[in-house]
Amino acid sequence: MRASVGDRLLVHGRIVGQHDRTAEVVEVLGPDGAPPYRVRFQDGHETLMSPGPDTVVQHEGEART
C-alpha cells in the first residue's frame, strides 16, 4: 500500500451495521509512501494507522464515489 499526504483512506466496516469510515492522510511516516500514516477522520480525530486489507487508498484527484 502506498499513499501520499492528501490521499484518503476508505476503511470498510468489518461487521454488520458498522459503517465505512474515511480518513485523510496528513503525514506519511514510512519510506516511499508506505505505512504507518497519521490520519484525520471526518470528526477531527487524528491517529496513527497501519491499514489492513479492509482499507482502500483513494489518491488525491481520483474520482470519489
Image (tube, rainbow, N blue to C red):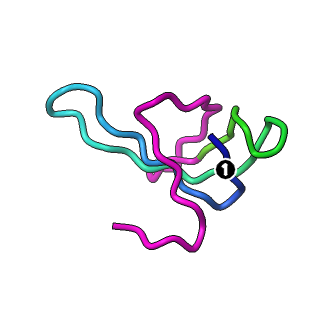
The dominant secondary structure in magenta is: loop
The percent coordinates of residue 27 (x first, y second) are: 74, 47
Residue 36 or 38: which is nearer the viewer? 36
In the rendered view, would you say 22 is above or below 36? below
Question: Residue at left 71%, top 56%?
Answer: 5
The percent coordinates of residue 55 (x first, y second) are: 45, 39
Q: Residues within 10 Å of mark 1 (few under 14, many from 20)?
A: many
Residue 30 or 42: which is nearer the viewer? 30
| Placement of the N terminus among the 4 image quadrants | top right
In the rendered view, would you say 63 is above or below 12? below
In the rendered view, would you say 60 is above or below 53? below
In the figure, residue 61 lies in which quadrant?
bottom right
Question: Residue at left 75%, top 45%?
Answer: 33
In the figure, residue 12 lies in which quadrant?
top left
Side (left or right) of 58 relative to 46? left
Q: What residue span does the magenta drawing correspond to?
A: 40-65
Question: Residue at left 60%, top 58%?
Answer: 7
| Placement of the C terminus among the 4 image quadrants | bottom left
Q: Is 3 covered by the magenta stretch?
A: no
Q: Secondary structure at mark 1?
A: loop
The percent coordinates of residue 6 (x first, y second) are: 65, 61
Side (left or right) of 54 relative to 16? right
According to the picture, the residue beneath numbered tag 1 turns out to be 3
The total of numbered circles placed on residues is 1
